[in-house]
Amino acid sequence: MTTQIKVTGTQNLGSVQFTGIEGGFGEGKKAMLVKDIAAIHGREVKHINELVNRNLIRFKTDLDVIDLKVAVQDDHNLIGYGFTKMQIAKSPNLYLLSERGYFKLLKILDDDTAWEIYDQLVDTYFNMRSELDTSNLSPELQMFNGLFKSLAKQELATKQLESKVDSISEIVAVNTVDWRKDTRQLINAVAKTQGGFSAYQEIQSEIYTELERRAGCKLSIRLTNKRNVMAGEGVSKSKRDKLNKVDVISDDKKLVEIYMAIVKEFAIKAGVWNG
């Protein structure tokens, strides 16, 4: 049996605004509409619905997904979730996903953008909790509440210090075996400390600039040259257009080493263990 679903207002992820929803999957549990997920990922709603419908055996009703067209009988009430009358009339499904359901959807989408966005949603939207109102507690209970908070802060500080040491060790340990994935994860972690997903491209650009300064090269020129060589070899334009500066870096062992060193420096400087 689903708990009451309620709209809590609007939330923002970068430049995308979406409907904040609680309930449905448990008291106070965060949930997201497929129409908002589609906007965040730059996909069409029908595409996301198709992915859910093709994999319905993996999505458990009332645990991963709720079809609001089934759960909310009155079309007028569906307007409160941000749907237009046309969307309500024409859409066979109006899906709502739990955090667990969204995680399953991301495994199906399986692209870099999907995982970067998921990190931020888990760290911000899904993990938001309301503050407990303690104003009505007795003076004795308020005293104990203050004591517990103080002890919790001390424990948190100790764990953060341990996490800091462990995280720096992990950063330094990044090597050339899987450097593309590892550096991408570090850059994403840095971005989360500086504004989230919208900061990713700016940080990546700063890293490229520093790499060019240290290595005395121009990545844009190397990228153009690489595309020209591939064109001469008959490689399709679509494949050439997908090349980026990281592909250029991967061609030069020295650039890979400098790039990894710079990314590690950015990560340590940003204090990614605080994220």
Image: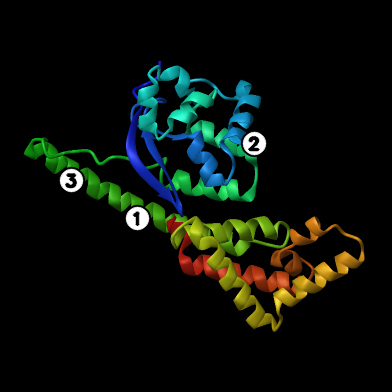
Q: Tags 3 and 1 in contact by the CB under 8 Å rule?
A: no
As shown in the figure, which amino acid type bears the numbered disc 1? Answer: Ala
For residue 8, the mark is none
- Mark 1 / mark 2, whichever is N-terminal: 2
Q: Residue at x 74, y 74 (%)?
A: 254
Report the residue that reaches farthest toward the front: 86
Q: Secondary structure at mark 2?
A: helix
For residue 108, the mark is 2
Q: Answer few, some or many: residues within 10 Å of disc 2's Cα (few below 14, many 20 plus, some between 14 and 19).
A: few
As shown in the figure, which amino acid type bears the numbered disc 2? Answer: Ile
As shown in the figure, which amino acid type bears the numbered disc 3? Answer: Gly
Q: Answer few, some or many: residues within 10 Å of disc 1's Cα (few below 14, many 20 plus, some between 14 and 19).
A: few
Q: CA distance from mark 1 to mark 2?
A: 37 Å
The spot of residue 187 in percent (x, y) is 56, 61
Comparing 157 with 20, the one in front is 20
Q: Residue at x 53, y 67 (%)?
A: 202
Q: Secondary structure at mark 1?
A: helix
The spot of residue 258 in percent (x, y) is 67, 74
For residue 27, which quarter of the picture? top left
- Mark 3 / mark 1, whichever is N-terminal: 3
- Mark 2 / mark 3, whichever is N-terminal: 2
Comparing 119 with 73, the one in front is 73
Residue that label 1 marks: 157
For residue 203, which quarter of the picture? bottom right
Q: CA distance from mark 2 to mark 3?
A: 45 Å
Horizontal relation, residue 22 to residue 214: left or right: left
Q: CA distance from mark 3 to mark 1?
A: 17 Å
Measured along the vertical axis of the image, is residue 39 above or below residue 80? below
Q: Tags 2 and 3 in contact by the CB under 8 Å rule?
A: no
Comparing 69 with 259, the one in front is 69
For residue 146, the mark is 3
Q: Secondary structure at mark 3?
A: helix
